[in-house]
Amino acid sequence: MLLKCHNCGSEADFKIMPKEFVCSVCGAVNVVPQISEAADEPLSCLAPTGFEWQLPAGKIGNPVFGFKYITAQGTQMTREEYLATFKIDPEVALQFMRSHRGVKFGRNM
Ligand SMILES: [Zn+2]
């Protein structure tokens, strides 16, 4: 599955289609359109909106079945997926956000 970076246009090949990925060329975060069929052409990805795109918007689940974190784009990810995509531990980020309520974050926190 070829995915095309929205920012620099470089293509990356994924065996398993991610929900979001970070471009290895330019470092931009790409949101992958969720489609069911495999496409012949590289799939163009979308830019996340807003500047708080790296931070989790929330957390769902329970201790028995596990938690999922909701990205700023609305995608649900496990902690492992989140770590792999953003290099941020969503649990730590959520705790930090809760203890700094009202604080705005920039890209380089
Ligand atoms: Zn790129």
Image (cartoon, rainbow, N blue to C red):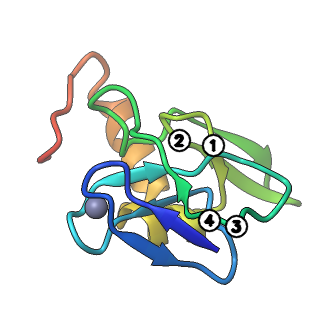
| Nearest to the observer: residue 8 or residue 18 | 8
**Residue to which mark 3 is pinned:** 40
Callout 1–callout 3 Cβ contact below 8 Å: no
Mark 1 CB in 8 Å range of ligand 1? no
Residue 23 in percent (x, y) is at 34, 66
Tag nearer the camera, 2 or 3: 3
Q: Residue at x 23, y 72 (%)?
A: 25
Residue pushed farthest left?
108
**Residue to which mark 2 is pinned:** 71
Q: Residue at x 45, y 61 (%)?
A: 4
Answer with mark 4 or mark 3, whichever residue precedes in sequence.
4
Q: Residue at x 38, y 58 (%)?
A: 5
Residue 51 position by quadrant: top left
Q: Residue at x 56, y 72 (%)?
A: 2
Disc 1 element: loop
**Residue to which mark 1 is pinned:** 75
Disc 3 element: loop
Q: Which mark is residue 18?
A: 4
Tag nearer the camera, 1 or 3: 3
Callout 1–callout 2 Cβ contact below 8 Å: yes
